[in-house]
Amino acid sequence: MKAWFADREAQNRSHEGVEAIARHWGRSALMTQLERELTELPERAPHAVLDAARRFLDKAGDIEALMHDLIASSRADPFFRPPFHPVSSEIHTGLLLFHNDDLSMALGVTGVEMLAAKKSGARGATSLGFTGLLTMFRYVKAGGAIVSFWEAPPIGDNFVAAEAGKARFVERRRIEDGEEIVIDGRHQSFVIEHATSDMVYFQALVRTGGAPLAAEYDSGSLALVGASSTDEASSRIQMMVSLLRAMERDDAFALIEETLNASPHFYTRWHIMREMLAMDADASLPALKRMAEGDPHPEIRAAARQTLGLFFADAADAVGDVLCRA
């Protein structure tokens, strides 16, 4: 390694090897056809996107050829790094092979030792995760895994925590080599309970048409314990609005109000409203009244009315009169 760091030409050769593999993958018929299929879809429905991913994975020979080139490059140069973004968690490692706004595809390994370490370590409360997104797993090696499957009430645009119900057990079974599993994360989940060897799989994550939220249910009581955004753009908006408020950028108030009116997600609208109130409560009053009267989500309307009652009593009475007449 010391010699490699001291040799600029060797470093350049390693870099050129990575770039060559990246170009080879990007220009391959396998990848260009997937991109073309996604671009030409008449509608970006989740199952249409998933079908394109399935056709990609059905070309096993083409995938194996590309993987062979990748492995050969790794063997030829110990400093070669695959030109793919790494993805990992407590129990798996992988490489992101393809990503756009509609679809992410990865090659992953769930390590049996990593899985055992998580299961045998100190554990507090555990949960069942419902991603809100449609996901397909195709297992090259299933590792003798035993998997439990779960369902919950569907997560929709008008998700209300108090009405989320409980998760329920569906079945427990062994996964076989070559098996394909499709999980609709809007109401389905699964848990790997045990494996005898490493699990190797392709994962296709459909990003279009998903639920606005991912949900977690307690594995003991099966009751809802939390929810989080599935929309990266909305999460970024929330972060930026909070930053502008913390920086006391009152000159951005009008722009922030525009994002309030444009946001499709109820949790983002309420986050923006809270920050607007913290910036300038009086200037926020008209938008808060509109929210109390007509926001599509019942919890947001209720929260806006409560806020009016706490800080703008006269306005709250006026909104109440309008609602009563309606």
Image (tube, helix red, strand yellow):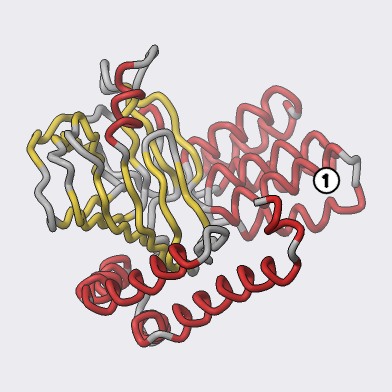
Q: Which residue: 56% across, 74% down?
A: 17
Q: Position of residue 85 (x, y in %)?
A: 53, 58
Q: Position of residue 110 (x, y in %)?
A: 31, 42
Q: Position of residue 94 (x, y in %)?
A: 41, 52
Q: Is the residue 118 above or below the residue 112 in the image? A: above
Describe residue 139's horizontal placement relative to residue 119 as left or right.
left
- Give the residue pinned by disc 1: 244
Q: Secondary structure at mark 1?
A: helix
Quarter of the figure with residue 81:
bottom right
Q: Position of residue 178 (x, y in %)?
A: 13, 58
Describe residue 185's horizontal placement relative to residue 1 as left or right.
left
Quarter of the figure with residue 318:
top right
Q: Which residue: 90% across, 46% down?
A: 249
Tally of marks? 1
Quarter of the figure with residue 135:
bottom left
Q: Which residue: 67% across, 25% down?
A: 309
Nearest the viewer among 314 and 42 is 42
The amino acid beneath tag 1 is Leu
Describe residue 103's horizontal placement relative to residue 295 as left or right.
left
> Alpha-carbon neighbours of circle 1 within 10 Å: few (<14), some, or many (≥20)?
some
Q: Is residue 194 visible?
A: yes
Nearest the viewer among 71 and 165 is 71
Nearest the viewer among 155 and 36 is 36
Q: Which residue: 27% across, 54% down?
A: 201
Describe residue 97's horizontal placement relative to residue 190 as left or right.
right
Q: Is residue 48 visible?
A: no
